[in-house]
Amino acid sequence: MEETKNSKILIADGDNSLLVYMRELLARFGYEVFCADTGEKAIRLLRAVRPAIVFLDLHLPGKDGLETLQQMKRMSEDTYIVMMSSDGLAKAVVTTMKMGAMDFLHKPFDQEELLATVGKQMDRRDLIDEAKFLREEIKRKAEFNRLFQNSEKMKEIQAIVEQVADTDITLLIQGESGTGKELVARAIYTLSARRDRPFLKVNCAALPEPLLESEMFGYEKGAFTDASSRKPGKFELADGGTIFLDEISEMMPSLQAKLLQVLQDKQFTHLGGKQDIRVDVRIVAATNQNLSESVAQGTFREDLFYRLNVVNIQVPPLRERKEEIPVLVEYFLKKFTREFKRKAPRLSTDLLDAFQRYHWPGNVRELENCMKKIVILDSDQAVCQELQKKCDGKQSEIQGKEPGLDELIKQNLDRYSLKAFSKEAIRRAEREVIGTVLQQTCWNRKEAAERLQISYKALLYKIKETGLER
């Protein structure tokens, strides 16, 4: 029999001579064997070594075999337990099997019988592990298809993801909040050669600078008041894998310098430490801001920006890929009916129409919250009314109350020149276009300026000139 990767076996029996026999025999075939002569010791060893197989005697001293079996199954439902007994009673076999034992060995047994039992349990576990892996692969593939296969814009991103996934190239993912930047990062990780190593996320906006530094890079004992012991950071824990830096634009300049060092030299020091720590980590960063503007404004390091921006993936907002909405609605409906154990409510045509008309400033995350609310309330009426109200909002809220252009001409025909009327018509057209774009971007002026193809400063001037108010 070949040595196996999952080689830990625990034997719990009150007969010391049997323990020695089984330990020596199994050790010769490459297994790492742990022995216990009481139920209490067996429980402690199960927790400490996490064996692949447990051989458990029915009549253990102290905590008997049935009680030990019951506790072991509570601790680790997937533990493979083989019961042993000199009793030939069918009732004992049936009872232990009902309680979760995988097999039963009648004492005395010979070498071939013991090794066959071990081999059978190892093969069984390998098959279950393989089935679990295949289920996870199917789930990952379904998630992958849901993300990329339902709009042309996302298919374009899929092509980039497939090209860069199996490289170690640094990536910058940009897009509004809620568009699915983290899902894109996870898709890259899943397709990469690092998929069997850790994927760790750090939200750069969630923690103040000192905490973020210790979270990312770890610290030494005594580095600050509460540092009672040495703690590794996310970069150490992700060694060999991928680290996802979300909201990278919120990182303070001092930390940007330390991150740049990791990108350049693949090493850093702990907070309060002096020794360099080398790591092999792929970095994927994401932001909902325009990093080019942050560089121009001096809030983000230019050299770090160019290090991160080797490949830039722009995730479009949901309003630019509305063909995905029916698929997402179906997905979230199934997800939340399972999660909340509810019957799927019937969705009205009015709701589906509102979904297509609405501009989704919160993107996929906002749609997800709408579907959650619908399932919990068992009705789409409240969400439908809310969206219709937003869709049909009066333009006067943006444009202000002013007479129409026709009315203005009638009132001022004898006083206004053609040039004056033209100027007023242009002002109103600009006001309407700018107001609409500002509404669609939830008054994100940087994004609005990009969409209008004017500078940020020019947009601020136009907002003031046309009298727009949020």
Image (spheres, rainbow, N blue to C red):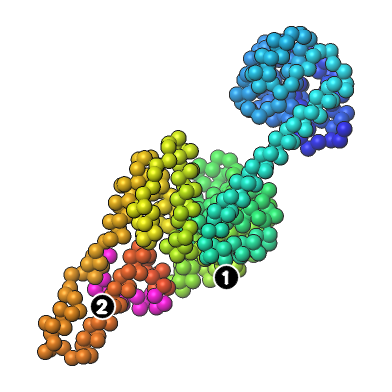
Can you say which quadrant of the picture contains the C terminus?
bottom left
- Main SS category, magenta section: helix
In this view, the residue in front, 93 or 290, is 93
The residue wearing badge 2 is 428
Whether residue 458 sits left or right of residue 59 in the image: it is: left
Give the residues in magenta: 452-470
Is 23 in the magenta? no
Residue plotted at (25% across, 82% down): 425
Residue 432 location (% of width, % of height): 29, 73
The residue wearing badge 1 is 306
Residue 12 location (% of width, % of height): 74, 18
Residue 214 location (% of width, % of height): 54, 50
As helix, strand or loop, the secondary structure at mark 2 comes to: helix
Give the foreground label among 2 and 1.
Answer: 2
The answer to which image quadrant residue 467 occupies is bottom left
Q: Amino acid at mark 2?
A: Arg
Residue 56 location (% of width, % of height): 73, 18
Q: Amino acid at mark 1?
A: Tyr
Whether residue 378 sits left or right of residue 265 in the image: it is: left
Does label 2 or label 1 sit earlier along the sequence?
1
The answer to which image quadrant residue 242 occupies is bottom right
Can you say which quadrant of the picture contains the N terminus?
top right
